[in-house]
């Protein structure tokens, strides 16, 4: 963060500009301020204006004193309040590296009911089953009788129709969608054609995403253009790689392949435009989100709602600067992420 001072007062008596730069996306934010503002004032302003755009910062670099930085952090952490500040989380582990057992899931649900939870959020699911054979549905019914709200993810088997799980009418089933923020990348061919994509991705769901960039790097490649599978359609998403890459839609990918096959020396440039917010064309259902209608009861409209589950970059737990690790141990694209987002909305 930096400050532009010595400006003439505005109508609202601001005489300075507070400049905040996101080191990851290189985007900058300019906020009118006054020289009399304290560190606490800046912390409140950041929470009000920037958290929704940038997220919670991991660290800051400022030209102010260490005392200012310390006061800013204290006020910032004190001012962060969620939509339910008195809520508590009770988390029950049912999965391990080998998967999960139905008995463990049911035991965790029974314990949660005994603990008196108000909301039961289940971030997994199996295949479609008749309600009387669906163990999760049966225990969820018991929870519903006790006044507990039960919500489950629709699972990750899209875009095949009738591919969802957790279909009982007493369960809120949540699918996945994209949202209107993306790190935009443009691929410019030598023939002047341009194709918008998303920063870093792979061929498709079943591919080993990390190994692709390793192979390209080992072959002395400096960047990658990756083409969506036909089923991924117009959805582009982000992932971790060891060199610059862009994901383009299936349609744009076919045009790029046509260009490559038309010349003996194909050339292209990848340019990064940073974060774009408010792109309405990006609000679509995620390709991997399981689809309805319900197999167990085709008369049910499922899933009832969808929530953001693609490119959840704000959830990145470690610094990615100068990181060459090809195998992150966390997901930024999967249906269960939508549960937390939809519950708070």
Image (tube, rainbow, N blue to C red):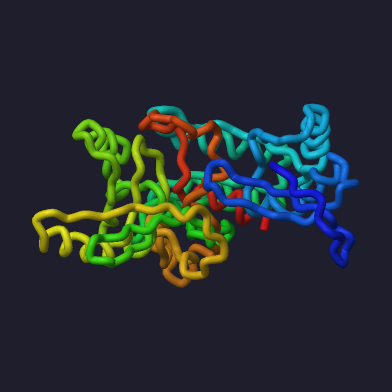
Front-most of residues 133 and 251: 251
Residue 128 in percent (x, y) is at: 39, 54
Q: Is residue 341 left or right of residue 1?
A: left
Front-most of residues 335 and 235: 235
Q: Is residue 283 visible?
A: yes
Q: Residue at x 37, y 62 (%)?
A: 196
Image quadrant in which you'd find residue 213: top left
Q: Residue at x 71, y 36 (%)?
A: 62
Q: Quadrant of the N terminus?
A: top right
Front-most of residues 80 and 321: 321
Residue 264 in percent (x, y) is at: 9, 56
Instruction: Count how many numbered circles sit on residues in the image.
Output: 0
Q: Is residue 23 left or right of residue 130?
A: right
Q: Is residue 269 left or right of residue 64?
A: left
Q: Is residue 218 above or below residue 12?
A: above
Front-most of residues 92 and 287: 287
Image quadrant in which you'd find residue 286: bottom left
Q: Is residue 160 visible?
A: no
Q: Residue at x 61, y 56 (%)?
A: 342
Image quadrant in which you'd find residue 218: top left
Q: Residue furthest bottom?
A: 299
Q: Residue furthest left?
A: 264
Residue 146 in percent (x, y) is at: 70, 50
Q: Is residue 248 above or below residue 299?
A: above
Residue 257 in percent (x, y) is at: 18, 60
Q: Residue at x 43, y 52 (%)?
A: 272
Q: Quadrant of the C terminus?
A: bottom right
């Amino acid at each position: 963060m930096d400050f532009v001072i010595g400006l003439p007062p505005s109508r609202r008596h601001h005489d300075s500009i507070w400049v905040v730069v996101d080191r990851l996306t290189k985007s900058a934010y300019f906020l009118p301020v006054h020289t009399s503002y304290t560190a606490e004032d800046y912390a409140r302003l950041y929470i009000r204006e920037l958290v929704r755009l940038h997220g919670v910062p991991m660290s800051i670099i400022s030209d102010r004193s260490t005392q200012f930085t310390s006061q800013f952090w204290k006020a910032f952490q004190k001012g962060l309040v969620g939509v339910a500040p008195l809520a508590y989380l009770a988390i029950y582990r049912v999965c391990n590296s080998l998967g999960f057992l139905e008995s463990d899931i049911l035991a965790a649900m029974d314990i949660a009911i005994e603990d008196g939870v108000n909301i039961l959020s289940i971030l997994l699911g199996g295949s479609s089953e008749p309600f009387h054979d669906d163990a999760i549905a049966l225990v969820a019914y018991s929870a519903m009788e006790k006044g507990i709200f039960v919500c489950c993810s629709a699972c990750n088997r899209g875009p095949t129709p009738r591919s969802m799980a957790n279909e009982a009418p007493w369960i809120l089933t949540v699918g996945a969608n994209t949202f209107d923020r993306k790190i935009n990348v443009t691929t410019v061919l030598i023939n002047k054609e341009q194709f918008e994509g998303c920063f870093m991705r792979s061929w498709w769901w079943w591919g080993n995403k990390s190994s692709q960039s390793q192979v390209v790097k080992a072959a002395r490649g400096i960047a990658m253009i990756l083409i969506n599978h036909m089923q991924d359609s117009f959805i582009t998403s982000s992932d971790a790689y060891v060199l610059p890459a862009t994901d383009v839609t299936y349609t744009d990918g076919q045009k790029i392949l046509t260009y490559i096959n038309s010349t003996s020396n194909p050339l292209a440039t990848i340019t990064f435009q940073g974060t774009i917010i408010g792109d309405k064309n990006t609000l679509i259902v995620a390709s991997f989100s399981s689809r309805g209608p319900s197999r167990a009861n085709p008369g049910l409209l499922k899933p009832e709602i969808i929530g953001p589950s693609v490119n959840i970059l704000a959830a990145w737990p470690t610094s990615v600067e100068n990181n060459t690790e090809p195998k992150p141990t966390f997901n930024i694209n999967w249906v269960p992420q939508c549960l937390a987002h939809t519950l708070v909305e």
